[in-house]
Amino acid sequence: MRSNSKPQSPAQSSVNIKLILISAFFLLFLLLVFSTTSSTRQQQEPSPSSSISESHNANSTTACPSLPLTPSCTKAPPSLANALIHYATTNITPQQTFKEISVSARVLEKKAPCNFLVFGLGHDSLMWAALNHGGRTVFLEEDKAWIEQVKQKLAGLESHHVEYDTKVHQADALLETGMKEECKVVSDPRSSDCELALKGFPSEIYEIEWDLIMVDAPTGFHDDAPGRMNAIYTAGLIARNRAEGETDVFVHDVNRIVEDKFSKAFLCEGYLREQQGLLRHFTIPSHRARSGRPFCP
């Protein structure tokens, strides 16, 4: 007998397959939750030999229980939720590689929440803010139009427009300038006599003690671009000028001449901790906390 029902179209078959897969994953998820819940409850139940005080503390605690799916304990922070949604719905990825990002992420894992200053507002900015959840992450960007474009999509990021008056083709002359004695004096960049010190940032940039500084801007891939000469020098000066402790400074694109030479000269090879791909990681101690410390070790 011939069936009266119509054969399924490829689209309908695809939908059915998706429904089957979703159902399978959902069932697997429920089994996982049930298994985890049972295991957790067994761990939480006091043994007969447990003391009365231990039993009382276990029953009277007000902290979040370790059971899964507890709304008050598993709610994702807004910064993390926004980052997940953003990167899940775009094909644009951060400019750094996984291995390069991992270097900074390891430091953030230890120090966050902290103060994180980033030269550049890019496709990885939301990621940095999320990794520093609870801390303050500030971005310095040269392109005012780009700032407005990013704000329309990611209004929660804190960014400031800054200007640079140098060009990449001036790098050799500026490197020679940086060797002068006035550029080896540690002070607030606003009062520095060194030509490399950037003085036009918002005042709070100089007043906050930054735990991490990432130099991934300004533009530096052609001769008439601003270049990162001043940014690298100023990042090092800000790190040295903190009252105490140390600052982790990262420089990206060290395959380029400016980033290579200026990071070695002003962040110092003696402070270099790691290089992964195109990223260098320096740890610069406070020079104010120890009088007479040389500019480079």
Image (spheres, grey):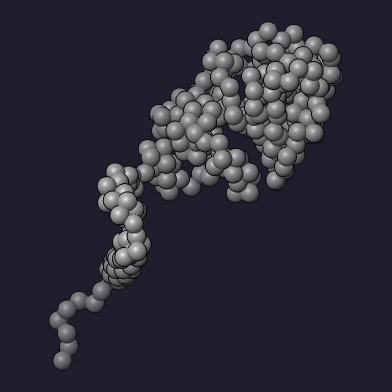
Seen from the viewer's position, the closer of residues 92 and 57 is 57
Seen from the viewer's position, the closer of residues 2 and 258 is 258
Q: Report how many numbered discs are placed on residues in the image.
A: 0
Seen from the viewer's position, the closer of residues 176 and 12 is 176
From the viewer's perspective, tell me whether residue 75 is left or right of residue 169. left
Q: Quadrant of the C terminus?
A: top right
Quadrant of residue 151 in the image?
Answer: top left
Residue found at x 37% / y 38%: 78
In percent of width and height, residue 119 lies at 60, 27
- Taking 214 as reference, is 238 above or below it? above
Residue found at x 71% / y 34%: 282
Q: Quadrant of the N terminus?
A: bottom left
In percent of width and height, residue 222 lies at 71, 29
- Quick check: can you spot residue 166? no
From the viewer's perspective, tell me whether residue 49 is left or right of residue 255. left
In percent of width and height, residue 105 lies at 57, 42
- Taking 12 as reference, is 70 above or below it? above
In percent of width and height, residue 46 lies at 32, 61
Residue found at x 70% / y 45%: 276
Quadrant of residue 83 in the image?
Answer: top left
Residue found at x 60% / y 40%: 107
Quadrant of residue 185 in the image?
Answer: top right
From the viewer's perspective, tell me whether residue 44 is left or right of residue 237. left
- Quick check: can you spot residue 287? yes
The residue sitting at the bottom extreme is 1
